[in-house]
Image (cartoon, rainbow, N blue to C red):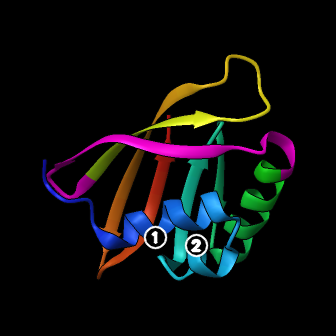
Amino acid sequence: MTPMPMVIQQYFQGVNQRDITLLTASLSADVQVQDEGEIYQGIASVCAWQHAAVARYQHHCHCVSWRQQQAQWYVDAEVSGAFAGSPVILTFVFTLVQQLIARVEID
């Protein structure tokens, strides 16, 4: 398996350790996150989304597989937390620009 880019590893470490500084260091200034039908644009918006998600779900992500297809990385993660059906496998689609995460789509 191709190694996962460090910046994506850093993203998941930040999420799991509840370390917003570590998380935001992996993001471009104009990052965009799409989750649960909503779009969050920019670091401040993404930080607010992450804080709200942690408060609501107390989630943890365990990456189970990843692959690169063209300019995107697809990461399947087992997400567990305080929500119905936990754990679930979600696919995170990352777009990297200049070694930073420019976009994340969570399906």
Q: Reply yes or no: does residue 71 show up in magenta.
A: yes
What secondary structure predominates along the stretch shown in magenta? Answer: strand
Could you tell me residue 66's position as x and y percent?
27, 45
Side (left or right) of 27 relative to 39: left
Residue under pointer 1: 10
The residue located at (35%, 44%) in the rendering is 75
Residue 38 vertical placement versus 32 (above, below): above
The residue located at (58%, 78%) in the rendering is 22
Q: Please, what secondary structure does the residue beneath circle 1 have?
A: helix
Is the C-beta separation of discs 2 and 1 under 8 Å?
A: yes
The CA distance from mark 2 to mark 1 is 6 Å
Could you tell me residue 84's position as x and y percent?
75, 19
Side (left or right) of 100 relative to 16: left
The residue located at (26%, 59%) in the rendering is 4
Could you tell me residue 95's position as x and y percent?
34, 60
The tag earlier along the polypeptide, 2 or 1, is 1
- Nearer to me, 64 or 35: 64
Side (left or right) of 79 relative to 100: right
Kind of residue sitting beneath label 1? Gln
* Residue stretch in magenta: 55-72
Residue under pointer 2: 23
The numbered dot on residue 97 is: none
Could you tell me residue 70's position as x and y percent?
14, 52
Place residue 14 in its image quadrant: bottom right
The residue located at (58%, 36%) in the rendering is 79
How many labels sit on residues? 2
The residue at the far top in this view is 85
